[in-house]
Image (cartoon, grey):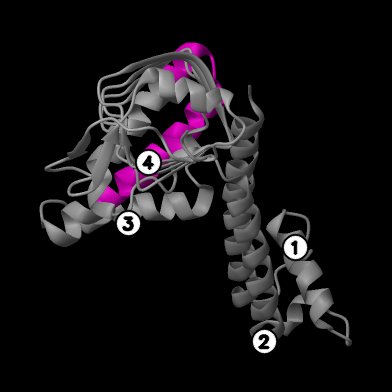
Amino acid sequence: MAAPNQLQGGAVIRLPKGKLAGIELRTTTDAELRGIAQSTNHTEVAKVSFYGGNLAHATFQGIKFIDSNLARVAFEDVTFSRCKFECVDLTRASFKNCSFSDCRFVNCDPYYTSFEKTEIDPAAFRRCFASHDEWNKALLLFSVLRLQLKEMGETRYSRMAEYWFRVWQRRRLYNRWRLKRVAGFGSWFGSLCLGALTGYGERPIYLAGWALGVVTIMSRVYMAWIPEALPTQTRHSTEFWYYSFRVFFGQGFTPQYSSAPLAIAQIGEFSVGLIMVALLIGSVARKLSP
């Protein structure tokens, strides 16, 4: 009888290339994997190969897959709950009518993996790729997720996949500009600024943080260089912050022209505030839409 977390043996193999090159793997069968799914003793599947196999109607809960070869495996009606995939080769694996819940992929290789009618959070792959040089695999993965989740009607997950697609697209632009010298600085920098400002429409909290920063910085500008913005004699820092907050949202303009620096500061802050509030509203609406 095999000990927990240890499969009974098949042939021992070594892969010549890929993510698992040089690691000693033991072949397994669909019956053994199904037995693990039904067992309460197993918490780990390590150094196994199920290359090109088929597995259907199984549920894995709390299983950690480590250093395993699941390339070209066809999964159908399989549920993964609280599972972790670490250094797993998923090249050309296919998931059909499957479900992933609270799972993570770390340093895996989901190259040309398909997810037909499969429920999965694209954020599960945020630590999947160990190197920025794997941008081509990342773009392919998130492109597939974006399209297949949209076909299922999972528009929120589809937008999340689009977010990670654009993150890796930015890394591709950096790679082409900095290392290969075949693209300009502007396209990468523009993508970087858009991601930092709005999170490509998926991070409205970024805009809220930037807005708070602008208000705080401008309050220091008023207090240090344009104190006539407040006619009172006290002029505490909190009063300048509140004044800057009102200008940012178009409520705190001075009733009449008093000096050019003040007018420029007010108009500049209000213009930035107008743009950022519009972006924030659009980003929140996008985030909350079904």
Graded by Cα atoms within 10 Å as few (under 14), some (14 to 19) or many (20 or more), the crowding at tag 3 reads some
Q: Amino acid at mark 4?
A: Arg
In the rendered view, would you say 266 is above or below 90?
below
In the rendered view, would you say 240 is above or below 21?
below
Q: Quadrant of residue 214?
A: bottom right
Discs 3/1, front:
3
Graded by Cα atoms within 10 Å as few (under 14), some (14 to 19) or many (20 or more), the crowding at tag 4 reads many
Q: How far across and down, in percent of the image, does residue 40 sit? A: 62, 32
Read off the residue under disc 4.
166
Q: Is residue 289 magenta?
A: no
Q: Amino acid at mark 3?
A: Phe
Q: Amino acid at mark 2?
A: Ala
Discs 1/4, front:
4
Proximity of marks 2 and 1: CB atoms separated by less than 8 Å: no
3D distance between C-alphas at marks 2 and 1: 16 Å
Q: Is residue 38 left or right of residue 230?
A: left
Graded by Cα atoms within 10 Å as few (under 14), some (14 to 19) or many (20 or more), the crowding at tag 1 reads many
Which badge, 2 or 4, comes first in the chain's sequence?
4
Read off the residue under disc 2.
224
- The stretch in magenta equals 148-173
Which residue is painted at 26% across and 45% down in the image? 135
Which residue is painted at 32% across and 56% down in the image? 189
Which badge, 2 or 1, comes first in the chain's sequence?
2
Q: How far across and down, in percent of the image, does residue 181 sit? A: 11, 57
Which badge, 3 or 1, comes first in the chain's sequence?
3
Q: Residue furthest front?
A: 1
Quick one: 245 or 158, which is closer to the camera? 158
Read off the residue under disc 1.
245
In the rendered view, would you say 68 is above or below 78?
below
Proximity of marks 2 and 3: CB atoms separated by less than 8 Å: no
Q: How far across and down, in percent of the image, does residue 161 sit? A: 44, 33
